[in-house]
Image (spheres, helix red, strand yellow):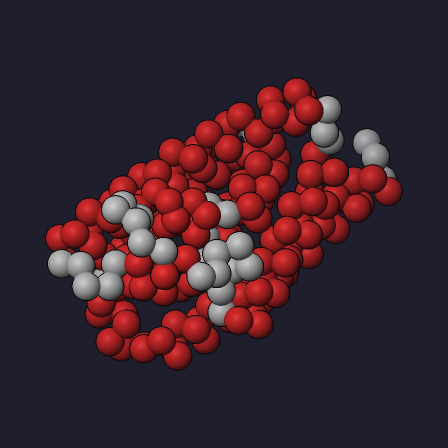
């Protein structure tokens, strides 16, 4: 149970929920509540499908490319740290700036699911976790991932209420706090890769 809770929390913050919420509000400004729910549903389903593919086929990708897990840990840790710094500094992810001004017929998959929810740093981290989890741990990891995305979906459903309660300033502050947590996760992933090189099995 503790692994499930910790995995859910890690994935929840990995998706930078309050930044996603801010982007969702900006991208769906002026839409009806039913239209917003439709966008939220499609974006969460798309993010879930992409995440599951990454979780289950990351190991095969490493084998094909000849990349070791420790190498990818270091790369993913650096990307995640850059994303965390961007959140702490500006309240936005470094790969997802300026997108609310884009005009699109359907924003649910692009740019909301990709790259707002599933960005480069998120992809790298999910790949690492997918390879690290084995046996029942992988099942628990998938459950934690699904739980995190469902929690994000609840936030998107309640986006109007949350915006009224917190305002843009409140959401920005929560995004910065998320960045601090992601920075710690990035450091842990990075150091795991470094220690893997220094102390090979």
Front one among 31 and 43 = 31
Q: Give the number of callouts.
A: 0
Quarter of the image with the C terminus is: top right
Q: Position of residue 180 (x, y in %)?
A: 58, 67
Instruction: Find residue 191 and report its horizontal and vertical position in percent.
Output: 74, 51
Residue 46 percent location from the top left of the image: 35, 38
Q: Is residue 117 above or below residue 181?
A: above
For residue 79, say whether it is visible.
yes
Residue shown at 83%/39% (left/top)?
Answer: 197
Residue 199 shown left or right of residue 107 in the figure: right
Residue placed furthest toward the front: 103
- Using residue 106 as the reference point, say whether residue 185 is left or right of it: right
Q: Is residue 109 above or below residue 186?
A: above
Residue located at (36% from left, 65% from top): 22
- Residue 141 horizontal side relative to residue 151, left or right: right
Can you name the residue that lies furthest to the right here?
Answer: 198
Q: Looking at the image, which is closer to me, 112 or 101? A: 101
Q: Nearer the viewer, residue 129 or 170?
A: 170
Tell me where residue 69 appears, x and y as whole percent. Answer: 70, 34
Task: Determine whether 182 is above or below 118 in the image.
Answer: below
Q: Is residue 146 visible?
A: no
74 in relation to 21, above or below: above
- The residue at the point 24 percent across, 63 percent down is 29
Q: Residue at x 41, y 57 (%)?
A: 99
């Amino acid at each position: 149970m503790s692994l499930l809770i910790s995995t859910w929390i890690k994935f929840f913050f990995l998706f930078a929920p309050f930044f996603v919420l801010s982007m969702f509000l900006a991208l769906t400004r002026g839409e009806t509540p039913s239209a917003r729910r439709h966008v939220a549903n499609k974006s969460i389903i798309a993010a879930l499908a992409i995440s599951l593919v990454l979780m289950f086929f990351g190991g095969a990708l490493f084998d094909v490319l000849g990349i070791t897990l420790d190498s990818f840990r270091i790369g993913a840790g650096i990307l995640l740290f850059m994303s965390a710094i961007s959140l702490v500094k500006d309240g936005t992810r470094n790969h997802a700036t300026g997108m609310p001004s884009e005009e699109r017929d359907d924003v649910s998959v692009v740019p909301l699911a990709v790259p707002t929810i599933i960005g480069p740093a998120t992809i790298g981290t999910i790949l690492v976790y997918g390879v690290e989890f084995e046996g029942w741990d992988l099942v628990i990891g998938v459950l934690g991932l699904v739980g995190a995305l469902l929690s994000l979906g609840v936030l998107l459903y309640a986006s109007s209420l949350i915006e009224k309660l917190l305002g843009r300033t409140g959401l920005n502050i929560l995004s910065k706090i998320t960045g601090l947590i992601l920075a710690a996760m990035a450091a842990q992933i990075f150091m795991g890769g470094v220690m893997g090189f220094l102390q090979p099995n």
